[in-house]
Image (cartoon, coloured by chain):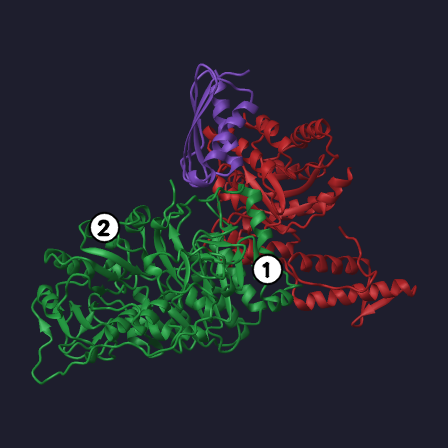
Chain colours: A green, B purple, C red
Amino acid sequence: MLNKIGRDIPMELECLQGRRVYEGQFAMTETGTRAGKPVKLHTPGENKLVGSIDEAIEKVGLKDGMSISFHHHLRNGDYVMKLVMDRVQAKGIKDITILNSSLAPCHEFLIDMIKDGTVTAIETSGLRDALGKFLTLNPGVLKRPVVIRSHGGRARAVCTGEAHIDVAFMGVPACDRRGNATGRKGKSACGALGYAMVDSHYADKTVLLTDNLIDYVYPISIPQTDVDYIVEVEAIGDPEGIASGAVGITKNPVQIKIAEMAAEFLDQAGIIQEGFSFQLGAGGAPLAVAKFIGEKLEKKGVVGGFGVGGATGVLVSMLEKGHIKAIYDTQTFDTTAAASLDNNPNHIEMSASMYADPTTDCMTNYLDVVFLGATEIDTDFNVNCMTDSNGILMGASGGHSDTAAGAKVTVITCPLIRGRLPMIRERVETVITPGESIDVLVTERGIAINPNRQDLIERFRDSNLPIYTIEELQQMAYDMVGKPEGIEVSHDPKDVVAIIEYRDGSIIDVVRKPLL
Amino acid sequence: MKHLVKAAMAGFDEKNDVLVTVEPIASGIEVELKSKVERAYGKHIRAFIEATVKEAGFDGVKVTAIDKAAWDYTIKARVLGALERGSAE
Amino acid sequence: MSRLTELAKKRLSRSMMFVPGNTPKMINSADIHGADSIMFDIEDSVAVTEKDTARLLTAEALKTLKFKGETVVRINHPTQTPYGYADLDVIVPAKPNLIRLPKTEDVSEVEIVAKKIEEVEKANGWEEGTINIIVAIESVKGLYNVREIAQGPRVVAIALGAEDYRADLRTGKHKPAHELLFARQTILHAAREAGIRVLDTVFSDVKDPQGFREEVEFIKALGYDGKSCIHPSQIKIIHEVFTPDEKEIAHSVKVLNSYAEALRNNKGVIAVDGKMIDGPIVVRAQRVVDKARAAGIKVELEEGAEIDVK
């Protein structure tokens, strides 16, 4: 069945029964009430501390066929999933659904657990490296295709109960003996715990793992009222992998050129003004935009409103220089930003739900502008940030479609050509964010405005910026490197390896096994 | 028709470049390609290398190319460079 | 002198960006930073073992890609090195806008290059002056012959190359570069006498944008048209310095409009803001307008007020 953006969704798949296809960025009509933890009486004298992961697994009653969740705040330094899954495997528990906020290269061990039947389903925002390749090339190795959700879409699915978590195993850098937890303190400090906040609240059972049991915690990110058990472990992660040093601004001249043009575009669009709010996606060019926005704010003598993170040192330095008044942060990317969250009251932690869940009053709806990267974009402005040029799962949905839908202006910053590959395609391999959410594409050789933004096209008619149609930019790339051949994929429904859920739960695309 | 007098190389194993080796063979043009962009441009690059050798008037050449996403002009320059080097006594 | 060569002498020439001629990655993105001229170098930045492949790569790039901006190739010297003639054989047919002759010491060297260009132009049926020459003065001998060199065939621009010149003087690098003052001014005077563009040498410390800016301001004050650069971040600074400010533009517009009006009404003497306007002031005003437009600033003049100073 073709959805609104012309993607053929094999609705006959068992996992898609009762689902609907994508019909537009704000087309959702479902109502209902949010899900929640089962009711249970707590009595004086309870002790949440248990001696081992095994004991926690027994106490929560984990058994075959259940769904368990982990968060990705510890990024590529995460030890928690391995610590828990090794015990799950040792206990012979099978048919587990891993319902993660995202997956990093350090979760490669899941391949063996998929092979032996411990893990039979995966739902995540991101997939990379060996695991992404394994899942793309081996359809049927899981009992149903991987479900890819945006951060906001996952928060929605968890809150509504669509993605039901039986047990949440949450690594926390600090907590007290009742389970009040924070990501701000300790040797494994990771900053905000936005994803963990949602999971802890909605899971049937919540187990915290910590390497830093302290007497009192404040501010509290995860409250004791959401926590069932606590396990003390030696380390929840490798500090090296949890947070890199300050994520710096790129030195790549092409990325800098793109960032500079993006900031200039924004300025000429009249957006850089008192109180304006923005988010910068991860990646070279989006982060570099910060520097140029800062320069423009200083030149105009105005102060922006708030920045939304994924906080980095770059955003923090804007806060500290007085370019913006606050940061709303759901996950923290580097040590500078983690320190800022701990010290600066204007660096505000928020849950993934408050960040981007379309069924809440989410912060993404308050964005004036967002700068995002793309693996590729097509002439309909649809963006892929999930599969690579060979059709392999190697990216993340992240907050891409959430912020793009919410922001008044969504700017994609992307080189026109990477290596030899033109980044503007006739049709992207996988759609994460629909073209209707994208307003502008900025490349190093020119800018294209989405034709549905006639107001912007009109405004830039006499601009000195190099404005083209997206087809003209595409031709420019083809003139330099030639037109690439597309990827051939299997059209057998059995070869669907991933379902791409739009943030409202509708199906925007599927990933099919590429034919090598 | 020109012929190589010896094997020769040109180019670099670097981003956007291609390391080309040419060797004399009895006749014909053989192309062996290892490319970063095999799926998108592999067929094109093989044909392009062959056409470049022909256009330069050579026969009896085996071309081995290790490509790191070089653009056509670079591929042509490196093939011509290797042929030139392989033709010098 | 041909029509095209005369035009080439007047081309906007604020920035000339050096790009190593044997590095595809740099060539691919050479023109995105908006340099007025892109100079592909197959001389000093290329090892002697790769001279052959560098000239082929640069030539194929010129034939295949459409670069925004003037294209220049710095060849190896035809008589001082064994590579120069082969460079000319491969590069000239690839039709760059300019051949840059390094370490020029005598006008006879310019004539060698001009003769080769003429042959190739004729063989291909290209209009005379399709390809021209920029010379670089990099030695005391070259500096003493600079007036004759600047007036050599097809020479449309001249540049100072300071590295070798400093060695020739037995001095080193200083900030500010007092040691270059005589050469800078001598070359400038020769260029103005010959009616050609004049560009300053590179500033190699890319981590000192402030020092770079000061040097650009200095050479602009001397009278230079532009500067050579080695990093994209330097282009922006050059263009900022060479972009007239709003006050300057507004005044120039007023001068040109008043001048046009005076011509229309056959008025002999005119004044703007109480100051007399004469020929040189009008030419200067038009140059300011041209530079502003090159920097992307919209400048509108009354009908008939535009004059051709190119």
Nearer to me, C277 or C57:
C57
Q: Is residue A176 above or below residue A129?
A: below
Numbered badge on residue A369: none
Q: Are marks 2 and 1 in contact (CB under 8 Å)?
A: no
Res. A170 image quadrant? bottom left
Q: CA distance from mark 2 to mark 1?
A: 55 Å
Q: Is residue A377 above or below residue C190?
A: below
Residue C300 in the figure: left or right of residue A71: right
Residue A408 in the figure: left or right of residue C217: left
Q: Secondary structure at mark 1?
A: helix
Residue A62 point in image, percent of width and height: 14, 65
Q: Amino acid at mark 2?
A: Ile
- Disc 2 crowd, CA 10 A, few/some/many (<14, 14-19, 20+): some
**Image quadrant for the N terminus of chain C?**
top right
Numbered badge on residue A111: 2
Residue C178 point in image, percent of width and height: 55, 51
Nearer to me, A207 or C236:
A207
Q: Amino acid at mark 1?
A: Glu
Nearer to me, C201 or A123:
A123
The residue where tag 1 is placed is C240
Of marks 2 and 1, the one in the foreground: 2
Whether residue A459 is visible here, answered yes or no, is yes
Whether residue C34 is visible here, answered yes or no, is no
Q: Residue at x 53, y 34 (%)?
A: C57
Res. B69 image quadrant? top left
